[in-house]
């Protein structure tokens, strides 16, 4: 089935939904990335953005996951999904939750059978191969937390009166030698594109280049507070705005969003030719 005409407004977001409890992969609702990327300024050819200035990954973690074994006993797990940034689609988050809930009364031969279905269905949804891992109940005690590392922008005592992103305020001092720096803020907040519900995040910006004005960067990030966009789109907008106005040689943007509906979505975008993929360890707020 073609997904080229799917829009967020057509999804189950903000609508009353009947929860299916038997396996149903048709619940997955893909949304092409191309439309929002076109808004940022990427060239779209045959429904796909070309010459992306970054590579990356969307890290999904699902905490409300259950199915039945062949004797009818419930099983629980945590599922992590790693979707490449160059996949043609995102998967709308409520449809992801509805899909996972369709396993609640579904009998499966074991976790490997569950994993196989997830791998196939989600790869079809994103339109590209995704990696899926399962953390079983006996492994829960080994789950770790980790905060994003870097210099905290939130330490700055600034006055703020703008709550929409204004990329023009971003600047870097190109009279100074290039530096390597990692900056972190826990004050990123945006709103769901469809429902307007708040999405809370911590963001890490690593770069090599002229020193970026930290106060301006913090004001810019706080400016997303009333901005309506999905997580992935916010991170790509931040990446492109910093690249355009600060012109670093290397740049990586990584956001850890708090969970909603038992799901957290954590986009990472980088142009490092040898960029190291960040950890998927959850933060204290997740």
Image: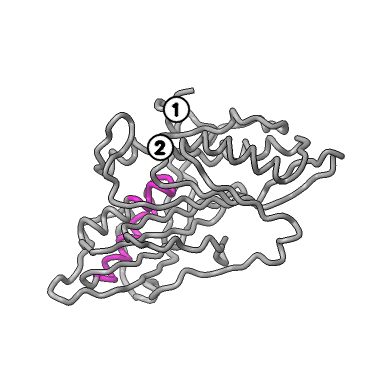
Instruction: Name the residue rendered at 58%, 36% in the picture.
Output: 120
Task: Measuring from the top left, give residue 283's x and y in whole percent.
Answer: 55, 65
Element under disc 2 = loop
User: From this viewpoint, which residue is outermost toward the top?
Assistant: 1
In the picture provided, is 85 more to the left or to the right than 172? Answer: right
Residue at the spot 40% in from the left edge and 53% down from the top edge: 56
Which residue in the rendered view is the most extreme toward the right?
Answer: 71
Please name the residue shown 20% across and 65% down the image: 171
Q: Which residue bears the numbered disc 1?
A: 3
Q: Which residues are magenta?
A: 212-236
Residue 122: x percent and y percent? 55, 38
CA distance separating discs 1 and 2: 10 Å
Find residue 194 and report its image quarter.
top left
User: Which residue is at a point 36% across and 65% down the rendered structure image?
Assistant: 205
Rendering colour mode: one colour
Element type at marker 1?
A: loop
Identify which residue, 97 or 82, lies in the foreground: 82
Q: Nearer the N terminus, badge 1 or badge 2?
A: 1
Left or right? Give the position of 284 relative to 245.
right
106 relative to 161, above or below: above
Decide whether residue 232 is among the magenta residues.
yes
Q: Considering only vertical position in the picture, is 69 above or below 165?
A: above
At which x and y percent is residue 197?
Answer: 49, 46
At label 2, counting other C-alpha atoms closer than 10 Å, the crowd grade (few under 14, some 14-19, many 20 or more) is many
Task: Report the residue marked by disc 2.
Answer: 88
- The residue carrying pointer 1 sits among few (fewer than 14), some (14 to 19) or many (20 or more) residues within 10 Å by Cα, namely some
Q: Are marks 1 and 2 in contact (CB under 8 Å)?
A: yes
Task: From the image, give the main secondary structure of the stretch colored magenta.
Answer: helix
Q: Nearer the viewer, residue 155 or 255?
A: 255
**Is 39 above or below relative to 263?**
above
Magenta stretch holds residue 231 = yes
């Amino acid at each position: 089935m073609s997904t080229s005409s799917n829009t967020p407004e057509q999804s189950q977001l903000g609508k009353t939904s009947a929860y299916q409890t038997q396996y149903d992969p048709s619940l997955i609702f893909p949304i092409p990335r191309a439309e929002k990327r076109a808004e940022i300024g990427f060239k779209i050819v045959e429904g796909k953005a070309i010459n992306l200035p970054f590579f990356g990954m969307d890290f999904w973690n699902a905490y409300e996951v259950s199915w039945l074994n062949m004797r009818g006993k419930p099983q629980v797990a945590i599922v992590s999904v790693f979707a490449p940034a160059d996949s043609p689609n995102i998967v709308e988050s409520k449809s992801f939750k509805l899909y996972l809930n369709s396993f609640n009364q579904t009998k499966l031969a074991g976790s490997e059978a569950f994993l196989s279905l997830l791998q196939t269905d989600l790869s079809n949804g994103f339109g590209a191969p995704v990696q899926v891992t399962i953390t079983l109940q006996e492994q829960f005690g080994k789950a770790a937390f980790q905060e994003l590392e870097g210099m905290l922008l939130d330490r700055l005592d600034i006055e703020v009166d703008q709550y929409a992103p204004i990329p023009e305020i971003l600047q870097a001092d190109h009279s100074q030698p290039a530096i390597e720096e990692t900056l972190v803020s826990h004050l990123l907040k945006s709103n769901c594109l469809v429902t307007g519900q708040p999405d809370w995040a911590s963001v890490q910006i690593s770069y090599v280049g002229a020193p970026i004005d930290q106060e301006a960067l913090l004001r810019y990030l706080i400016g997303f507070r009333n901005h309506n966009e999905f997580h992935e789109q916010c991170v790509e907008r931040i990446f492109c705005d910093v690249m355009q106005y600060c012109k670093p040689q290397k740049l990586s943007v990584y956001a850890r969003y708090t969970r909603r509906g038992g799901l957290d979505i954590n986009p990472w975008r980088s142009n490092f030719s040898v960029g190291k993929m960040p950890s998927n360890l959850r933060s204290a707020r997740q």
